[in-house]
Image (spheres, rainbow, N blue to C red):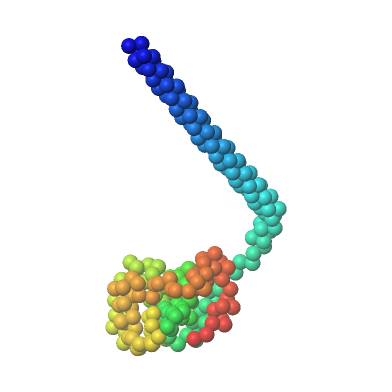
Amino acid sequence: MRTAVKCAASATVALVIAYYGSWQVWIWGADEREGTWRARERDLQKELDAAKQQTEYAYRRCTEIHRTYQAIIETHVSATNLVSPDVLVAAARQRLQNVQYAGDFVGFAPSPTVFYELSVVFKRYGTPVMYDAFLQDTNPVVRAMGLLCYARTDPQHYETILRQFASDITRLRVYHDTCNSQLMMLGKFAQNLHDDPKFLSGDGYTDDFLFFKALVALGEARPERLIDSEE
């Protein structure tokens, strides 16, 4: 009996020791994992601090550069030689007299026609008096320009103009986003402008044309481009 009690007591003590030992091992393992996690957290914080310092340095440098060159930039802007709209319009009107066809874009890689580039100027700086003069010109291409300008700047008044030109059978060559021109009666041209808002009204496919439109809007387009442009 005593032997059994001693064996039971010994077994209990052994279990307690084993349990305590395993608990100590688990605690030690948890401490190690926490230490590793905290070390990684410190490393990450160092990286974040370094990135923040680099960002702040870059911002300071950008600010310094801007301050250094701000005066130069402002001087350049103030000295920009803006072209008088009157000079640009006069060059455009002179060029229009020699244009042989109407249209917007032409070619396999479509580029704007001279007619369409000139229309950008006239729609931006033209007046009803100018448009009326175009409509009375003997050159059908010039009359087509008057129609285009009125159709895109004053659609309500264009309704009246359309009735005047609907029966005009004068023929002119027209390019409309194609390589080949077509002969079109001026009355049909006028009707197309009325029926299709996209007829001769696109922005094109070339950065150069979009840049030209921006220059016209800003008053920085040069008349030399209009005078030197080719059919």
Q: From the viewer's perspective, tell me whether residue 55 is left or right of residue 214.
A: right
In the image, 64 versus 95, the foreground residue is 64
Instruction: From the top left corner, tell me how far across and down residue 97 is, in percent.
Output: 49, 84
- Quadrant where the N terminus is found in the figure: top left
In the image, 24 versus 76, the foreground residue is 24
Q: From the viewer's perspective, tell me whether residue 221 is left or right of residue 160.
A: right
42 shown above or below 110 = above
Instruction: From the top left corner, tell me how far across and down residue 78 is, in percent.
Output: 65, 59
Q: Residue at x 34, y 83 (%)?
A: 186
Residue 166 visible in rendering: yes
In the image, 160 versus 53, the foreground residue is 53
> Residue 56: which quarter of the image?
top right
230 shown above or below 124 = below
Q: Residue at x 45, y 70 (%)?
A: 123
Residue closest to the far top: 2
Q: Residue at x 58, y 41 (%)?
A: 43
> Residue 149: which quarter of the image?
bottom left
In the image, 15 versus 22, the foreground residue is 15
> Residue 17: which quarter of the image?
top left
Instruction: From the top left corner, tell me how far across and down residue 66 is, in percent.
Output: 66, 52
Q: Residue at x 51, y 79 (%)?
A: 93
Instruction: From the top left corner, tell me how far across and down residue 223 is, in percent.
Output: 57, 76
Residue 115 visible in rendering: no
